[in-house]
Amino acid sequence: MTELLQDPKVKVEMLIRKPVQEVFEAFIDPGITSKFWFTQGTGRLEVGSHVQWHWEMYGATADVEVKEIEENKRILLDWGTLVEWTFTAQADNETFVTITDSGFRGSSDEVVKQALNSTEGFTIVLCGLKAYLEHGVRLNLVSDKAPYAHIS
């Protein structure tokens, strides 16, 4: 088996044509986030808080610990890996969002699979965010990614 020479670090990015405060709030407030990513969150993201995110269509839950928040600039959380969102205002009504994910664990094959899944997942999240914030459209990307996954 080939060993990895470097631990993978996922990075996905997208320009959202909305003010940075609105884009940042979309990840802080589960009432907004549930319109494009998970179906329910147990609370707003605040430094030191522990929340749960639920994907009811898959019967999945993630335990999330909020490590750091810099308002309208950065969110860092731990949900088994370290995920960081950065928000960069490009103009009054444009925000460049970068999501990085690192700290994958397991064999080389498992780490590569996790990184690929994370890249795909966070790309879908940013596409859903863009459609929702810019056009008010809920694309149901997360639920339609694997609509029959809950059926065994």
Image (spheres, rainbow, N blue to C red):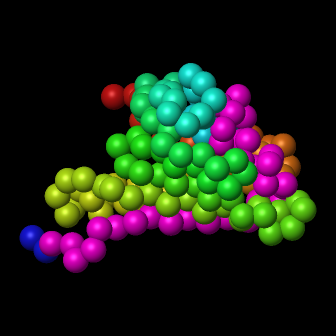
What x and y, as percent, mark residue 135? 85, 49
- Is 127 located above or below residue 46 in the figure? below
Is residue 75 shown to the viewer in this render? yes
Residue 132 shown left or right of residue 34 in the figure: right
Magenta highlight range: 3-32
Residue farthest toward the left in the current orientation of the protein: 1
> Which of 152/65 is in front?
65
Residue farthest toward the right in the current orientation of the protein: 92
| On-image quarter of the N terminus | bottom left
Name which residue lies at 84% across and 54% down. 19
The quarter of the picture where residue 80 lies is top left
Name which residue lies at 72% across and 42% down. 26
| On-image quarter of the C terminus | top left
The quarter of the picture where residue 95 lies is bottom right
Name which residue lies at 70% across and 28% down. 31
Name which residue lies at 50% across and 38% down. 66
What x and y, as percent, mark residue 7? 29, 68
Q: Is residue 27 magenta?
A: yes
Residue 66 shown left or right of residue 74 in the figure: left
Residue 104 shown left or right of residue 54 in the figure: left
